[in-house]
Image (spheres, rainbow, N blue to C red):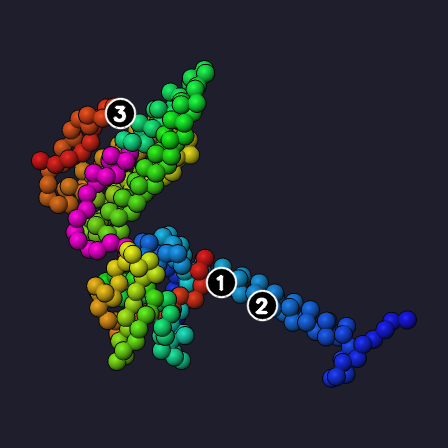
């Protein structure tokens, strides 16, 4: 025989338990409905930009860091590839391999950060109008920085350098400076963009 | 802006809002009450919209700061913000 415990307000323990379950069900249902509504609303609304600026607007911008970082990614890719092809890598080689991967990761992130600063803080609407391929070049370079981190992609790293060099050329043009391609002097060879 | 969707650009609101994170904002909460200390709000200065947290309210003016104090462009440089400049409150983070 089922034993029913009656509480002060005349409700059994089972009834109290059922009510709590019902309340929880309603809460979960409401949360789900809210989430679906938010998803629908977010798809309808256009995405605007809210700046959470992290730099003092000092006016000092330079595409140089992104170029150095891109050459570093290429160099690390070359070194990783060399070590990867070794038949009997020593502990030192393995240690160097890990360090190269880390440096490649760090400089890939640096590229995104540097390009993000140029994109959001330096380049203005008039620059994007004057150089219609600028936005696509930045997007391309950022995508390649992700791709070159994910893989040992020599070709991708070279394409990334090329895209960043084109961005650097646009950057100098916006400052009414004449961009010039000069020999990098790095082990990666190739060029970097400076100005006259 | 009853309801708006923003993509965050920058790191000054970390660790609460991250670079490239999307948020929903609404001005509805400010129809019934004023922004209060601790609210994360979007506001307009010149042609740009920023996101910061309300730190202090004085004479109907709002002092806004970034959560990442080490590295933030906020009211310390922008100055006090009026209620008219505040567009809405961050009500949902994706």
Q: Looking at the image, which residue sits at the far bottom?
A: A9
- Quadrant housing the N terminus of chain A: bottom right
Query: Alpha-carbon neighbours of circle 3 within 10 Å: few (<14), some, or many (≥20)?
Result: some
> Is any part of residue A130 visible from this angle?
no
Q: Is residue A61 above or below residue A40?
A: above
Please tell me how many numbered marks the rendered image carries.
3
Q: Name the residue that disc number 1 marks.
A: A38
Q: Residue at x 65, y 67 (%)?
A: A25
The spot of residue B54 in percent (x, y) is 33, 69
For residue B30, the mark is none
**Taking A89 as reference, is A64 left or right?**
left
Q: Looking at the image, which residue sits at the far top?
A: A87
Magenta highlight range: A50-70
- Which structural element holds mark 2? helix
> Is any part of residue B24 visible from this angle?
yes
Inter-mark Cα distance, 2 to 1: 12 Å
**Taking A32 as reference, is B93 left or right?**
left
- Of badges 2 and 3, nearer the viewer stands 3
Q: Name the residue that disc number 3 marks.
A: A188
- First in sequence, mark 2 or 3: give its number: 2
Inter-mark Cα distance, 1 to 3: 49 Å
- Which structural element holds mark 1? helix
For residue A30, the mark is 2
Q: Residue at x 76, y 80 (%)?
A: A7
């Amino acid at each position: 025989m089922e034993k029913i415990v009656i509480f002060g307000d005349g409700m059994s323990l089972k009834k109290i338990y059922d009510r709590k379950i019902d309340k929880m069900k309603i809460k979960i249902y409401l949360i789900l409905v809210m989430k679906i509504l938010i998803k629908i609303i977010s798809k309808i609304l256009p995405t605007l930009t809210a700046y959470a600026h992290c730099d003092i607007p000092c006016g000092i911008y330079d595409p140089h860091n992104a170029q150095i970082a891109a050459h570093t990614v290429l160099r690390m890719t070359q070194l990783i590839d060399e070590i990867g092809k070794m038949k009997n890598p020593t502990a030192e080689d393995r240690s160097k391999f890990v360090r190269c991967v880390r440096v490649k990761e760090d400089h890939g992130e640096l590229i995104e950060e540097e390009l993000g600063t140029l994109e959001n803080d330096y380049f203005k609407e008039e620059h994007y109008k004057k150089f219609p391929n600028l936005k696509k070049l930045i997007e391309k370079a950022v995508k390649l920085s992700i791709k070159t981190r994910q893989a040992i992609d020599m070709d991708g790293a070279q394409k990334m350098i090329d895209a960043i060099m084109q961005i650097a050329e646009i950057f100098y043009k916006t400052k009414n400076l004449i961009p010039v391609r000069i020999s990098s002097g790095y082990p990666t060879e190739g060029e970097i963009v400076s100005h006259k | 802006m009853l309801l708006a969707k923003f993509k965050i650009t920058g790191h000054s609101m970390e660790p609460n809002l991250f670079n490239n994170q999307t948020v929903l904002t609404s001005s509805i909460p400010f129809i019934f009450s004023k922004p209060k200390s601790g609210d994360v709000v979007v506001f307009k200065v010149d042609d740009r919209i920023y996101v910061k947290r309300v730190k202090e309210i004085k004479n109907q003016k709002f002092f806004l700061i970034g959560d990442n104090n080490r590295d933030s462009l906020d009211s310390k440089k922008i100055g006090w913000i009026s209620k008219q400049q505040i567009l809405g409150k961050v009500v949902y983070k994706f």
